[in-house]
Image: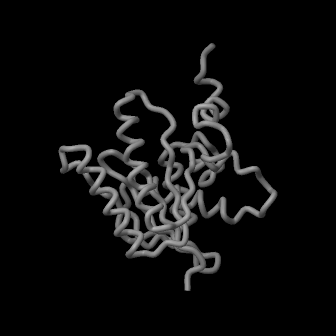
Amino acid sequence: MPKRIILGIDPGSRHTGYAILVEEGRVFRAIACDAIHVDHLKDHTDRLQYLYRAVTDLIREYRPTDCAVETPVYGVDPLAMLKLGRAQAAALLAIANEELPVCEYYPKAIKKAVTGNGNAAKKQVAYMLEKLVTLPSNRMSADASDALAVAWCHQMALDRPVGTSSGKAYHQNNGKSSWAAFVDENPDRVSS
């Protein structure tokens, strides 16, 4: 029987990646890696409802013990960021309504958990996941790979012994606003 089943989600306004990471002993398997596609729906509200229902269905099918969602922190287009935040909220609401624990992780923390480098390229993250996790036989999309990285990040956070880290690098809810944390993590992107 699996020790943990983690649902990782990489929210998107058109394609939301998801992955189910199973820990059996010290072996990690991705039993599902795919994306929820909502780009066929024109109305944004319909997309959010579809996403909410799809995440709820995933939870009921795979019965995860834990859930993790990537937190978007910046973007060029404010409207796109708003839509992305709404997609994240739909996923979080689906998880909360199924009464499961959920953690949020910044993109840099996810990359660091997988590669050791918070500025790693997506290809580096995908390469490392191939080494760390037994993957499904089908080829993963970039959205699915990103979701698997979210699940792996959560697995690493759960495995850290208590007291070894404050968790600031990983957890969204660390007492700072997301903007304050963003500024701390990205001093080179802030001008006076």
Q: Quadrant of the C terminus?
A: top right
**Residue 175 sits above or below residue 20 on the image:** above
- Colouring style: one colour
Displayed quadrant of residue 155: bottom right
| Residue 79 % position (x, y) | 34, 31
Total numbered badges shown on the rendered structure: 0
Residue 120 pos. (x, y %): 56, 43
Q: Residue at x 64, y 76 (%)?
A: 26
Quadrant of residue 77 within the rendered picture: top left
**In the displayed image of the protein, which residue is found farthest to the bottom?**
1
Q: Residue furthest top?
A: 192
Horizontal side of residue 8 vs 12, given as left or right: right
Q: Nearer the viewer, residue 147 or 121?
A: 147
Residue sitting at x 31%, y 62%: 53
Which residue is more in the foreground, 65 or 139?
65
- Quarter location, residue 144: bottom left
Please tell me whether residue 60 is drawn above or below residue 156 in the rendered image: below
Height in image: 34 above or below 109?
A: below
Measuring 70% from the left and 46% from the top, which residue is drawn there? Answer: 168
Q: Is residue 190 above or below residue 47?
A: above
Residue nearest the viewer, comparing 122 with 81: 81
Q: Residue furthest right?
A: 163
Which quadrant would the N terminus be assigned to in this image? bottom right
> Which residue corresponds to the image point at 52% horizontal and 67% vertical from the top-left?
6
Point out residue 158 in the picture as x, y percentages from the top left corner: 66, 64
The location of residue 133, given as percent across then percent down, is: 54, 67
